[in-house]
Amino acid sequence: MCARCRRPVSVCYCAALPRLETATRVVILQHPRERDMPIGTARMATLCLPGAALHVGMRWGEHAGLAEALGDPARPPILLYPGAGARDVLTEPPAGPVTLIVVDGTWSQAKTIVRDNPILQALPRYAFATPEPSRYRIRKEPSEEYVSTIEALMHVLGALEGEPAKFRALLDPLNAMVEAQLACQQRSPRRFTRAPRVVHPPRKRVPDAIAARYADLVCVVGEANAWPYRSDAANPGDELVHWAAYRPATGETFDRVAAPQKALSPNTKFHTGLDDAVVLAGIPRAELIDAFARFLRPSDVICAWGHFASKLFVAGGGALPELFDLRVAAQRLTHRKVGSLETYAATLGTPPRLPVDGRAGLRLAMLVAIVESMR
């Protein structure tokens, strides 16, 4: 791989790169999914323009690099993006040096970035109708009048700086990359054959832990004596102080509070929903772990939201049987990120009331409600 253009050496285009100084300050905002596109042109453009900056991301409201560029009094910012109110940069270029903000990505990705960033929407907007067809023959554009990022910069910088011929040199590395890519395709043509259609069985919508092993399911919630991670004092780490479990098939409940072995965090009452006196009066943690071991059966499956509860229990010296992550199951069923337990449970209505105090009781009821809704 070439360390400069990040292309295989056999198709490196570095020999065709010009060096073009500009009075225009060029800032390219690249969608994260475009960063690893091997035939993208944003990096190519920055290699040609020594004063250009390339930033990758989605949210730009608090980006220090962009904020510094937008605040340049000698070069006020403009946004290169079509839409209502956009002025034609080829026929009506702004006077004087500017900071040119360019969004790099597919048209759908660029639309998302501009839509989700008010700081970009507030900029004066410029666009243009390309005076010639795109040379980007190795990547399909949505329409014939669309061009690659480096071609757009060629046209726009030529208009902004009054030297169209100078910036046509930006096409040299693009042409080199396109020709090398097409030559590779001719040397190694792909032969596509239609594979026989495979009929897959329908996907199970209910996890086996709920559909087939409901009788073995035990929902668990753990609460910790947790110190703030950014406290001035050394963080003594989380330790288990409240462990609650519920077996939906039978209604059996386990509820124990363990006295902390370290100093009680000032946040413990807020997180657990239990008074400090209740926590300090808890049983020894080893006694809690032994009691839960007697509550479990050899065939049980532990059902939790994520891995916090199980890791907290094991860190306290306990052992757990097979773990079923209810959060992962919810994501697979809905085909989306589901957020926190509270957020997802709120979509199912009011959870049942369980005989467990504090936040553990509320969260345990949410787990049960989600299990029953899947079942």
Image: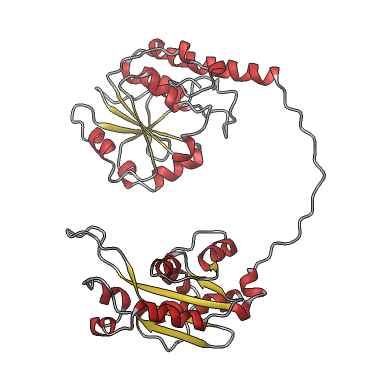
Left or right for 171, reference 264: right
Q: Position of residue 224 (x, y in %)?
A: 33, 71
Q: Which residue is nearer to you in this view: 363 or 225?
A: 225
Observer-nearest residue: 175 or 132? 175
Res 158 quadrant in image: top left
User: In the rendered view, would you say 112 is above or below 215?
Assistant: above
x, y percentage for residue 257? 35, 82
70 to 132, vertically: above or below: below
Above or below, comparing residue 275 to residue 333 in the picture: below
Residue plotted at (54% across, 68% down): 323
Q: Residue furthest right?
A: 196
| Residue 139 in picture, x, y percent from top left | 58, 28
Q: Is residue 237 left or right of residue 115?
A: left
Quadrant assignment for the C terminus: bottom right
Q: Let me know if residue 365 appears in the view.
A: no
Nearest the eye: 6 or 18: 6
Q: Going 45% across and 83% down the picture, which residue do you hit? A: 291
Whole-percent x, y for residue 160 in the image: 33, 21
Q: Which residue is more in the foreground, 172 or 107?
A: 172
Q: Residue sitting at 48 percent across and 70 percent down? A: 319
Looking at the image, residue 210 sits to the left or right of residue 71; the answer is: right
